[in-house]
Amino acid sequence: MYLAAILVLMLIAPLASILVEALVAGGPLAGLVLKWFVFWGIGARLGLAGLKQVTQPAFTAQTIFEIADPKAQVIVQELGFANLAFGLMGLLSLAFPAFLQPAAVGGGLFYLLAGVMHALRAGKTRTETIAMVSDLGIVAVLAVAAVL
């Protein structure tokens, strides 16, 4: 389920949105890539992750980090609030284009730091490996779109 959600939010939905807008309205490809990867990859993914972390912190603690101690749940909830904030900026970037760059920079830095942390961690679970690859993947997409 986690892999399917990541594939939809980080690959399928952004690519479909880019294709539809390119065919209907046109516009520079780099701008469309940035717009839709920020909306889906930062807005939807981090927003949904934040909602899950705030409402079900044990899931992230146990599934991604393999921490069973209930005391970790408070930290996961705080991470969830940060994810909700980044997610909201990404989602609002469609209605408020001025949010696009700050959401891309903030969300991109968050993903970069999280991806590096996952990469350096020994004994990663399959779920953490998926998170690492998707985190670093969106950083690469955002970086390329930003310089084009």
Image (spheres, grey):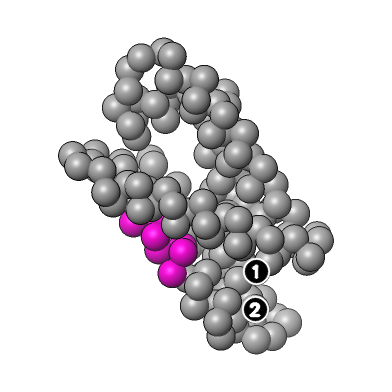
CB under 8 Å between discs 2 and 1:
yes
Residue 106 in sight = yes
Q: Position of residue 132 (x, y in %)?
A: 34, 51
Position of residue 36 relative to residue 145, above or below, is: above
| Residue 78 sits inside the magenta stretch | no
Q: Could you tell me the amino acid type at mark 2?
A: Gly
Instruction: Check disc 2: other Cα within 10 Å, few if <14, some if 14-19, many if 20+.
Output: few
Residue under numbered circle 1: 35
* Residue 141 coordinates in the image, percent (x, y): 47, 71
At a point 38% along the width and 40% down the height, the residue shown is 1
Residue span colored magenta: 133-140
Residue 111: image location, x then y, percent: 47, 54
| The stretch drawn in magenta includes residue 136 | yes
**Residue type indicated by callout 1:** Lys
Q: Residue at x 40, y 63 (%)?
A: 137
Residue 139 in percent (x, y) is at: 46, 64
Using the rendered view, name the quadrant where residue 58 is placed.
Answer: top left
On screen, residue 137 above or below 64: below
Taking 2 as reference, is 93 above or below it? below
Give the crowd class for mark 1: few <14, some 14-19, many >=20 residues within 10 Å: many
Give the residue at mark 2. Answer: 31
